[in-house]
Image: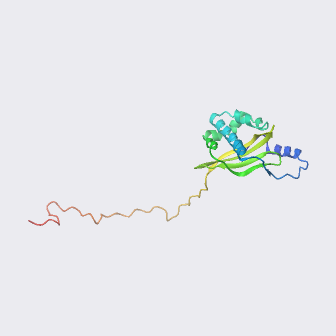
Amino acid sequence: MVFASQPRELNAQSQQKSAAPAAQAAPTPAQIDRNGVLILIRSALIALDQGNKTGNYTVLRDLGAPGFQSNTAARLAEIFMAQRRDNIDLSGVAVLDPQLTVLPQIESNGMLRMAGFFPSVPTQVNFELIFAPVNGQWRLFGISVNIGQSAPVAPNPPPSAETKSAPAPKQSPSPASKPAPPANKPADNQQPK
């Protein structure tokens, strides 16, 4: 996941805000409606898709929280180089509905976290997003996107001795076909004159 800072620093920030650093609060469900969730997810992933297609990640960077903006556009280009090289197309997120595996929740550090996937065939887009509150708005703080199988795939069984190819049996002439009679002999169905 691309974070604005290392996870250790995130923990240190959340401990400073907490009165009791040893007791971490459990995540709580976020008070956000379905449309708000869709806007956050689609905005982040479409900005990433456009960055991957153009090689310019300044919009993705500028949409982020101040901590996320500590990544330069060049650094984001390095991070997402494999997706760009593989021509990963995320444009389907504009019309498909995401399936959430982690419902929007507020973490102990005050950040909004959600995860899920966009089902499509033959691959699906898996994502995890973290947003930080900035001036009354949720701004991108962390993003992870990868492409996976849309359904479980069973492995192929190893070849066994029985499945090895055997020589084909020799074929004899078909019983329905008779060889032609010699030219000087009458055929069986001809009557002598």
Determine which quarter of the picture holds residue 43.
top right
Q: Position of residue 86 (x, y in %)?
A: 61, 41
Residue at the image position 38 percent from the left and 64 percent from the top: 169
Q: Position of residue 187 (x, y in %)?
A: 16, 64
Say above or below: 35 vs 179. Answer: above
The residue lying toward the viewer, choosing from 154 and 28, is 28
Q: Quadrant of the N terminus?
A: top right
The residue lying toward the viewer, choosing from 52 and 37, is 37
The residue lying toward the viewer, choosing from 84 and 39, is 39
Residue found at the very far left of the displayed protein: 193
Q: How many marks?
A: 0
Residue at the image position 63 percent from the left and 34 percent from the top: 54
**Residue 67 seen by the camera:** yes
Determine which quarter of the picture holds residue 38.
top right
**Residue 88 seen by the camera:** no
Report the side of 190 relative to 90 (left or right): left
Residue at the image position 12 percent from the left and 66 percent from the top: 191
Say above or below: 76 vs 150. Answer: above
Colour scheme of the picture: rainbow
Q: Position of residue 60 (x, y in %)?
A: 71, 36
Q: Position of residue 17 (x, y in %)?
A: 88, 44
Say above or below: 183 vs 148. Answer: below
Report the side of 126 relative to 157 (left or right): right
Q: Quadrant of the C terminus?
A: bottom left
Residue at the image position 73 percent from the left and 47 percent from the top: 33
